[in-house]
Amino acid sequence: MESLTTSRNGFLRGLLGTLGVFLLSGIGKAWGTAPGDAGHGKRPLKPGEHRWGMVIDLDKCTGCGSCVVACSTENNLALGNPQEAAMGRIIRWLKILPSQEGEFPAPKQRLLPMPCQQCDTPPCTKVCPVYATFRNEEGIVGQVYSRCIGCRYCLNACPYTCKDFNWKAPVWPKEMQASFNPDVSIRPKGVVEKCLFCHHRLQRAKEEAVAEGRPLRENDYQPACAEICPAKAIVFGDLNNNDSDAANLSKDPRAFHLLEELGAEPKVTYLKEGA
Amino acid sequence: MRPRNWTFYVQLAGFAGFCAFAVAANGWFVWRAAASYRLGDAWLPAVVMGSIIGPIFIILSWIISRLFFKIALRKTKSGKSPAPLEIFPEEEVLVAPIFEAPTGGFLATMAVLTCVSLWAIFAWCYQMYYGLAVTGLNNPVFWGFYITNFVFFIGISHAGTLISAILRIVQAEWRRSITRSAEVITVLVLVFGAGNIILDLGRPDRALNVFLAGRFQSPLMWDVCSITTYLIGSTLYLYLPLIPDIAILRDRAQGWRKPLYELLSLNWSGSHEEREVLEKCIAIMAILVIPVAVSVHTVVSYVFSMTVQPMWHSTIFGPYFVVGAIFSGIAALIIAMAVLRKGYGLENHLRAIHFENLGKLLLVMCCLWFYFTFSEYLTTWYGGEPEHMVIFNLKISGPYAPAFWLMAVTCFVVPFGVLVSPLGKTVRGTVIASSTVIVGMWLERFLIVVPTLIRPRLPYTTGGYTPSWVEISLFAGCISTFVMLYAMFTRVFPIVSIWEVREGKEQAEGEVVARIRTYFPS
């Protein structure tokens, strides 16, 4: 009886051990959470490829709002109306968040331009039930408008509250309908949309580079907000390219990320104001 | 062999259809796992989910095959139809709602409910046409009434199957007259729970994308799998104990009911062998539905707790939601039983002792609910993380304080006070406690969903959330349609299990005495 028990225990232990080894070796990849892996719902970053990122210098930002206008025009965002604004339903892929510090007589207002933070481990792509949002090989978090079911789980999971939802079909004044950007699709009602770092501009830049038979150059691709910023507060570039301004600035002593402690690894870096 | 009439072919189609569905469900998990792998996404979640849900569907189809081969295809002597099953005089009151014309009060109630439901259908069409702009939802309050109702209805659904399964397994003899009314609540209210997700979708026309492009890392997919399994399982669990009752009705019914009962009674004759098969199937189902039911509200809670949002990201949400679900479920059951008792004169079947016993269960869940709520809020407050405290203060002392304290009163103070007093042993007392619990549990769900979304971490200019008439209409419509379907069920099937009560009266006493004897030294 004694030996039977021992051998059974031994067998069980061996079985569990084998299973454990099998699981530990495969589990990280299979769950998509292994270190260095791109993680939830994302393809791994290929080494040597581009990794697009943005640096926003809060010292330089004047809060003029031209980035918001440029973004909205570039990406065919509907204007919205006062009723929608009162309901909090205006869609802007890039917002400027004001925050008040201190009370009268010495109040200070800080401004925070907020595009999608383009996280490396995005909390939004984790929760999508239908593969409608994903992070691509170059680090841009995309949204598939034609597949999105509009459950808005990704919006709720995003700690930065960066995505937007089409509460109704977008409408434009007649005069504006001739000036749509043909490179960007119009979103239907009921789907989620977001800042894509002007991904269509990357597509065009890549096509031009191929047509001219040369590699993609550093400044071939700039999103509308970075291009327009009169104070040059927004710097955009390839974080994998050590010579790019964006890569260097993102290592600046003033550099910080929003809500860094949540571990979403955003690729939008801010440079501290007044330091 | 029984004659090959149309009922045989429909039953065959049902059996074959379900088996095909079970196979397809298993194949679907494999397909999704392979698709995830191809996309470079994690495939293990699909495999894990499939290896849990897949075997459950196989067990369900095995049960259905038992029903088909052992009951429906049973060899009968000389091919004669079985002798009619009789209805005893004291059981007439149970079949009266089925065979007697409905009263004026019943019809008037149904008419009112129909109006509310039609209005809700109009509201839904309105929302489909104009989009979710017609709701009070906004940026950043992306979820509101619909998700609250989803969690609330799924919670209510724990009334039936779970309670009736637990009582069956522990052989609580007093369960016999209440299980049916509980199981019907489960099946019907689940439909509305899942339906509220459809109401909430921006693109309900694309809802099937969860099957075509399902991604198992999403807690919403876990919900889809778990709730679908629960709905199918609890429908079967409702149907199994109905079979002998349908057979009893079949032998008296006329007109349109006759073919319906003939089809659903599976040629039941009440022989010993049939009973053995059926009782074994019921026993298996009773065990099977408990983990499924627990998983349902656990994964509903995971939808919130898997995010990193303040006061959603809580480790106790799984059991907290399950406890709340059973709590609200028992309350809903007590109210439904009280209405049935009054409306159909079932005082002799749904007796004060049933309410007293359910009241005790309600009291236990009330204490557990308080324990969980206390733990949840105390740890948040003591830890005092600023982001969590923003939400905490919204609930305790901010704009949601009235709702929060009303919840505390209706979920704990009133039901606890009533149930520990002598009033807790009466029908009236348990109904009062249950009514407040229903209100309180809805508030609890609302207070979990909305306040977290009102204040994002970053300094957004935020408004608030006021539900629009569309959301309120659809909530009212869900409730009215549920009540209507429940009332219609009571007009087609007996709401108190005839055969189980009969069996209890005839056999249970001897069984219980024999069982008690085994507890003690001989």
Image (tube, helix red, strand yellow):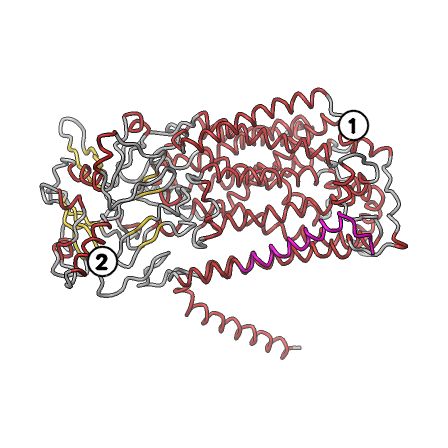
Secondary structure that dominates the magenta span: helix
* B346 displayed left or right of A140: right
Q: Foreground: A43 or A178?
A: A178
Answer whether residue B10 is magenta in the image.
Answer: yes
* Magenta residues, start to end: B1-27
User: At 61% across and 28% down in the image, what residue appears?
Assistant: B418
Looking at the rendering, which quadrant does residue A224 occupy? top left
Q: Which mark is residue A51?
A: 2
Parent chain of label 1 = B
Indicate the amino acid at tag 1: Glu
Q: Foreground: A136 or A249?
A: A136
User: At 51% across and 43% down in the image, what residue appears?
Assistant: B321
- Residue positioned most to the right: B78
Q: Which mark is residue B100?
A: 1
Q: Position of residue B256 (x, y in %)?
A: 76, 35
Q: Position of residue A82 (x, y in %)?
A: 27, 25
Q: Quadrant of the N terminus of chain B?
A: bottom right
Is disc 2 surrounded by few (<14), some (14 to 19) or many (20+) residues within 10 Å? many
Indicate the amino acid at tag 2: Arg
Q: Position of residue B54 (x, y in %)?
A: 57, 58
Q: CA distance from mark 1 to mark 2?
A: 74 Å
Q: Are marks 1 and 2 in contact (CB under 8 Å)?
A: no
Is disc 1 surrounded by few (<14), some (14 to 19) or many (20+) residues within 10 Å? few
Secondary structure at badge 2 equals loop
Q: Quadrant of the C terminus of chain B?
A: bottom right
